[in-house]
Amino acid sequence: MSDPAPNGLTQSRWPKRIGRLIDAICLVALIAVFMTVIYGFWLRAMWAHGYYLAVAVAILGAFVILIGLAQQAIAARDVATWRDMAEWQIRAARAAAGKSDDEIEPHSAAYYEVLIGTLVAHAEQDEQDIAREHYP
C-alpha cells in the first residue's frame, strides 16, 4: 500500500522533533504542577492532622487527568488512522471500478460525498454477495 496523502491531521508548523520536545516540556510542567499541589495538600494535612482526603483526591485527580491526556492522544491517532483507511478504500473502489483517480480536495464537501458514496456502494455490494450465497 502506498503512503497516504498528507492531510490536515498530520500538518504542523513545527517539525516532529520540536513538537515532541514541546509535548515533553508541557508534560513535565503539568507533572510539576500536580506534584506542587499534592505536596501543598500533604503539608497542610501534616500540619492540621487532617485533610488526608484532599491529598487522596489530588492524587486521584492527577491520574485521571494524565489518563485523559493519553486517551486524547490515542483518539487523535485513531482519527488519522480512520482517515487513512477511508482514503485507501476510496482509491481501491475507484481502481476496482476502473475509474481514474480524480484528485479531490480532502477538505471539500465533495470528498466526503465520494467517501460516503463509496462506503454505501461497498456495503450494498457486500449485502448482494451475501444474499447470492445464501439464496442462489
Image (tube, helix red, strand yellow):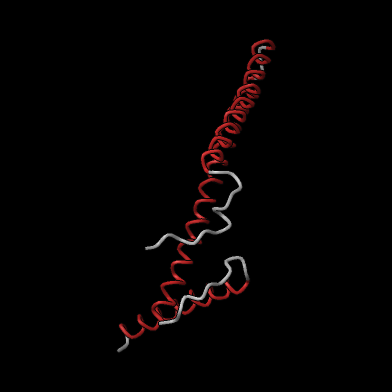
The structure residue drawn at horizontal position 59% and vertical position 49%, both measured from the top left corner, is 12
Q: Where is residue 2 in the image (x, y as percent from the top left)?
A: 39, 62
The structure residue drawn at horizontal position 62% and vertical position 28%, both measured from the top left corner, is 29
Q: In this view, does 49 lie above or below 76?
A: above
Q: Position of residue 89 (x, y in %)?
A: 44, 69
Residue in front for this viewpoint, 7 or 126: 7
Q: Is residue 20 above or below residue 103?
A: above
Specify the quadrant that holds the N terminus: bottom left
Tell me where residue 3 sits by quadrant: bottom left
Tell me where residue 96 sits by quadrant: bottom left
Q: In this view, does 36 lie above or below 120?
A: above
Specify the quadrant that holds the C terminus: bottom left
Tell me where residue 106 sits by quadrant: bottom right
Number of marks in picture: 0
Find the residue positioned furthest to the top.
Answer: 47
The structure residue drawn at horizontal position 41% and vertical position 82%, both measured from the top left corner, is 97
Q: Is residue 65 above or below residue 85?
A: above
Q: Position of residue 85 (x, y in %)?
A: 45, 63
